Image: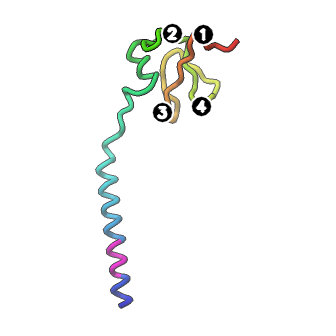
């Protein structure tokens, strides 16, 4: 009985590994497409300058994590997050 139980457990684990490997291979070539999301994508499509949804003037883009990095054009940080637009009336004095 003990030998049969071990064999059953081993077969179950092997089956789970095969299914997991199959899913990993199937998803390997399907990266998510983020090209149409976020403020940076909107501004990249319109060329920057003015926000087409609000009509406000964008001065620059700031790092989404609060780091002191800015950009004159829309871009993403090292984690793929869109930089945040800073508008003319939002500049701290």
Q: Main secondary structure of the magenta part?
A: helix
Q: Residue pushed farthest front?
A: 54
Earlier sequence position, callout 1 versus callout 2: 2
CB of mark 4 within 8 Å of CB of mark 2?
A: no
Residue 26 as seen in the image, left or right of residue 6: left
Mark before the other along the chain sequence, 4 or 3: 4
Q: Residue at x 49, y 27 (%)?
A: 82
Q: Which residues are magenta?
A: 7-12
- Do callouts 1 and 2 mark residues in contact (Cβ within 8 Å)? yes
Q: Residue at x 52, y 33 (%)?
A: 78
Q: In this figure, what is the number of numbered marks?
A: 4
The reply to whether the C-beta atoms of the residues labelled 3 and 2 are less than 8 Å apart is no
Helix, strand or loop under label 2: loop
Which residue is rendered at x = 57% and y = 26% of the image?
63
Is residue 65 shown above or below 16?
above
- How far apart marks 3 and 1 lie (CA) works out to 27 Å
Q: Label 1, on which residue? A: 89
Label whose residue precedes the other's in the sequence (4 or 2): 2
In the rendered image, residue 8 lying in the magenta stretch gets the answer: yes
Q: Position of residue 12 (x, y in %)?
A: 33, 72
Q: Residue beneath label 3, please? A: 80
Numbered label attached to residue 65:
4
* Numbered badge on residue 56: 2
Name the mark nearer the viewer: 3 or 1: 1
């Amino acid at each position: 009985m003990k030998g049969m139980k071990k064999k059953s457990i081993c077969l179950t684990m092997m089956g789970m590994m095969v299914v997991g490997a199959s899913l990993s291979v199937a998803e390997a070539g399907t990266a998510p497409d983020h090209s149409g999301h976020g403020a940076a994508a909107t501004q990249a499509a319109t060329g920057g300058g003015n926000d087409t949804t609000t009509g406000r003037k964008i001065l620059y883009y700031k790092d989404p994590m609060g780091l002191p990095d800015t950009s004159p054009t829309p871009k993403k940080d090292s984690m793929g997050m869109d930089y945040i637009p800073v508008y003319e009336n939002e500049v701290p004095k």
